[in-house]
Amino acid sequence: RRPLAWLDRRCWWEWHWFRGIDPTANREPIPFAVKAAVIVRDWPHCQICGGLVAFGEHHLDHVIPYSKGGPDTVDNLRLAHDLCNMRRGARV
């Protein structure tokens, strides 16, 4: 018998395979200078909901999603709560 957690992992892999995405492929990280410029520009407000962002609870959100071809540039990134960013997903 397989543990129930196995089903979650299998669903995750199948979701990626169905969309033609290699889940093991590593993408280039956002350059530190770009991250720093976005944080300095937007700190301390979430650019999605407008609330205050605590350090460690922030994400850099792509205005045009990376999965839809959005670049890792200062103009295409904004500071957001981690939950606001995850809730938004890959919508434009």
Image (cartoon, rainbow, N blue to C red):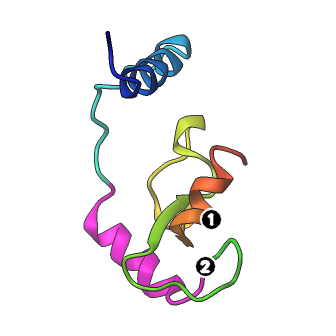
- Of 71 and 27, nearer the camera is 27
Determine contact: label 2, label 1, CB under 8 Å: yes
Determine the residue positioned at 54% across, 36% down: 67
Q: Which residue is mark 2?
A: 46
Residue range of the region highlighted in magenta in the rendering: 30-45
Tell me if residue 49 comes above or below residue 45 in the rendering: above
Q: Secondary structure at mark 1?
A: helix
Determine the residue positioned at 59% across, 46% down: 65
Q: Which residue is mark 1?
A: 84
Tell me if residue 41 comes above or below residue 31 in the rendering: below
- Of 9 and 34, nearer the camera is 9
Q: How far from the left and from the top, in percent, is residue 21?
A: 45, 20
- Badge nearest the viewer, 2 or 1: 1
Q: Is residue 44 magenta?
A: yes
| Crowding near the residue tagged with mark 2, few <14, some 14–19, many ≥20 C-alpha atoms within 10 Å | many
In this rendering, would 87 be left or right of 72?
right
Q: Earlier in the sequence, mark 2 or mark 1?
A: 2
Tell me if residue 6 comes above or below residue 77 in the rendering: above
In this rendering, would 92 be left or right of 85?
right
Q: Secondary structure at mark 2?
A: loop
Q: How far from the left and from the top, in percent, is residue 57?
A: 44, 75
- Tell me the distance, in whole angstroms, between the alpha carbons under discs 2 and 1: 8 Å
Q: How far from the left and from the top, in percent, is residue 55?
A: 39, 84
The number of callouts visible is 2
